[in-house]
Amino acid sequence: MSRLKGIKNDLMHIIEALHAVTNVDITIVDENLERVVSTVHYSDEGSKAPVNSAFHKCILTGEQYFIENPKKNQMCFQCSNSKSCRELIEFCIPVKYDNKIIGVLGMCAYDEIAKQNLLLNKDSYMNFESQISVLISTIISEKSTMRMLEYRSSEMLTLINSLSEGIIVINNNKDIVTTNKYINEKLNININKIPGIRDLLTEKVYSKLSSVDFSGEAGPANLNGMEFVINANPIMVKGRQEGIVFVLSDFNKMKESVLESNRKMDLITFDDIVGESEALLQARREAVQVADNDASVLICGETGTGKEVFARAIHNLSKRKNNVFMAINCGAIPENLIESELFGYEKGSFTGASSAGKMGKFEICKDGTLFLDEIGDLPLLMQVKLNRALEEKEILRVGGNTPVKVNPRIISATHKDLSNLSEKNLFRNDLYYRLNVVPIKLPPLRERGYDVIILSRYFLNHFSRVYDKDIKGFSPEAEILLLKHKFPGNIRELRNLVEYAVIFEQDNIVGTENIRKKIGSVIESENVKLADLTRAYEKTVIENKIKKLGDDLDAKKEAARQLGISIATLYRKLEV
């Protein structure tokens, strides 16, 4: 039997306490990948963690692994459980004894609140390794129950004091037993004269938590000039409640964490919108002009034309750029869940709801920008509730009765004709007019002419770097082929096509073969101007000649001479 299995009960106490404090699910596996203990309700103790998972690699290397979005992380592609993985974020810490790895402690988030808690305390958790190893080593080595309890209490206090969140622990009589260093400093608590829990949290917050049996969330609440989201969790020991732990999270830091995550992945400006067609330039001018005010924007365009890219660029140029941007696809969420996604829900509102409740998108980005994609697919009942939320600037969580003030800037998008839907009573007039203050029309790619080549080269350079390939460009025939295609999937289709061509191209120039494989050999030539085809071909011929002769002035003069044009004409055709 592994060492960790021999102290299973003690480990269970540890992870239950950590879970109550952090609101993050914890699993400990031994060196054979067998799950010893876990706070995940659906996990089977004794079953094995997946082969090639982060747990497995942690045992093999002895290194920590912090993985955001496991399903999209390359490290997890070979995991035997990758297809059915439910984790939003994962942190694995090796457990050591006598300088040997005897297991792994994994901290996993299965909902957005737990994910943000884990991200917010990432640095603190990364310092747990030595403390966890020392703690478990002591449990293994020391058999005295009293010494174990004393050590666990001291170690737990150290861990609690290392968190950048407030911790308040009360007993069953509602007397405060422990407060950590963070909350003592933020609320100016004198540890020699700690006030009552009602005074500390305010009567309003205490009553709110009491109404959910101290197993849920309250806030944001203003305490000593700071906004906190307060989570109450019962401390359970052998099935009996032995107290309650309150976790106070800085609401502004939570918003900043979401914002920073968005910045890293999606810092998009108008400089990232590539193209020179007049229709695109007009849409960009309108978007830039409206960015710095709070008017509602309705972006219209076919699927794949870049509506979310425009929305993010508008947000990042607005006065709300330092607040949260959140996107929600109104057509991709089941009708029975769309309200809880937008407005959040209280504890126990429906089967499968989080025991702590959940903030909705409106509440999370109450001072930021909310992007409602495919707004034309929003059910009629939700249109009524959305219109009311926009009019009143407040929402009610599902299952709740306390209004929450919100004021996000709304940018919506659709590929449908909302005006036509409104005339047919399939989309509410009042909501349509509220959303359609500033309409912006994005042209389909087939109407953008030479932008097809500009975007193709942009994507080619990008994917050449991604896949570490030395591809210089497209052949003239390939560019003509691209100009002829109608691109029903617009920019998204073009991006995927170029990525495919880069992956399978064996030469340093992308020819027609891989493009035809992806889009077929029969290509419509309607709406493609002869001038566009001619410009594309001429520019490619000139660029290939310069690559052969050199890029200095004398080489360009020689290239012009060989092509039978003046040096001025050569420069003009290169700038097209």
Image (cartoon, rainbow, N blue to C red):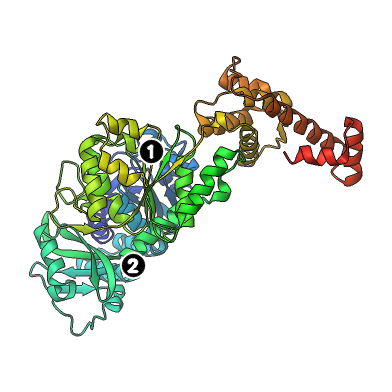
462 left or right, relative to 81: right
Which residue is painted at 83% across and 38% down in the image? Answer: 569
Residue type (three-letter) at the residue carrying disc 1: Pro
Nearer to us in this view, 362 or 160: 362
Q: Quadrant of the C terminus?
A: top right
Mark closer to the chain start, 1 or 2: 1
Mark-to-mark CA distance, 1 and 2: 30 Å
Residue 60 visible (yes or no): yes
Q: Position of residue 452 (x, y in %)?
A: 61, 32
Q: How many discs mark residues in the rendered view?
A: 2
Residue type (three-letter) at the residue carrying disc 2: Leu
SS assignment at label 2: loop
* Residue at the farthest front position: 423
SS assignment at label 1: loop
Which residue is painted at 70% across and 27% down in the image? Answer: 531
Q: Position of residue 451 (x, y in %)?
A: 62, 35
Q: Position of residue 175 (x, y in %)?
A: 11, 73
Q: Give the labeled residue for mark 1.
A: 50
331 left or right, relative to 78: left
Q: Give the labeled residue for mark 2.
A: 163
512 left or right, relative to 396: right
